[in-house]
Amino acid sequence: MWVIAFDITKTIGIMLVKKRMNAKKALERAQRLCSRQEKCSADIRLNLVRWGVEPKEIESIIAMLVREKYIDESRYAVTFARDKARLNKWGPKKIAMGLKAKGLSSDNVNIALAEIKDLVTAESLMDLLNKKVKMVKHSSPAELRGKLIRFGLSRGFEYSDVANAAERITRK
């Protein structure tokens, strides 16, 4: 039997769920998932919908996970920000947008951004742009500068920082 499930929190549309999962089994599965990796309530809510859990049971499962500290939004925000800054070389703007897309509060976003201030520096931006210079094809310094600025902005850095770094690189 196929069941149609709607997810209101995300715009994924209609999903076909083969079989509904009962609340107890879904809670155990969510606990295992949260104990292996940091998750926010939006991630777990999406999984619960995919598993075919009843909508009224979803909120009680999430509340239980929060109460038992399997889900902690501030801990998730800091982990997300640290991983994206260190591994993906994202800037503060892109990290903030990613956290807001997950439905985290502004307080949690600000805590996470304060935590990664030392990871997202002008030197890290310069390193990122210097690596990009080696891969970019350009015919003039102005074209190179434009491409570097677009790249730096797409990574979530402030325009003034990116423009200064691109200017220093093109002067070399």
Image: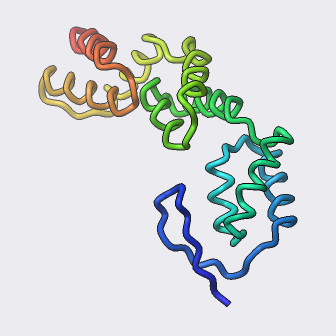
The residue under the point 47% across, 68% down is 13
Residue 130 in the image, given as x and y percentages of width and height: 37, 20
Residue 152 versus residue 114: which sits nearer the camera? 114
Residue 32 versus residue 55: which sits nearer the camera? 55
Which of the 4 image quadrants contains residue 131? top left
Give above or below for 77 relative to 7: above
Which of the 4 image quadrants contains residue 166? top left
Residue 36 in the image, given as x and y percentages of width and height: 80, 46
Seen in the image, is 155 located left or right of residue 29? left
Which of the 4 image quadrants contains residue 152? top left
Give above or below for 134 relative to 68: above
Quadrant of the image containing the N terminus: bottom right
Residue 30 in the image, given as x and y percentages of width and height: 79, 55
Seen in the image, is 122 located left or right of residue 133? right
Residue 139 versus residue 108: which sits nearer the camera? 108
Q: Which colouring convention does the figure follow?
A: rainbow
Give above or below for 108 relative to 54: above
Outermost residue on the bottom side: it is: 1
Seen in the image, is 15 located left or right of residue 170? right
Give above or below for 38 relative to 145: below
Seen in the image, is 101 located left or right of residue 79? left
Outermost residue on the front side: it is: 56
Quadrant of the image containing the C terminus: top left
The residue under the point 72% across, 40% down is 38
* Badge count: 0
The residue under the point 83% across, 45% down is 35
The residue under the point 73% across, 77% down is 20
Residue 78 in the image, given as x and y percentages of width and height: 65, 27
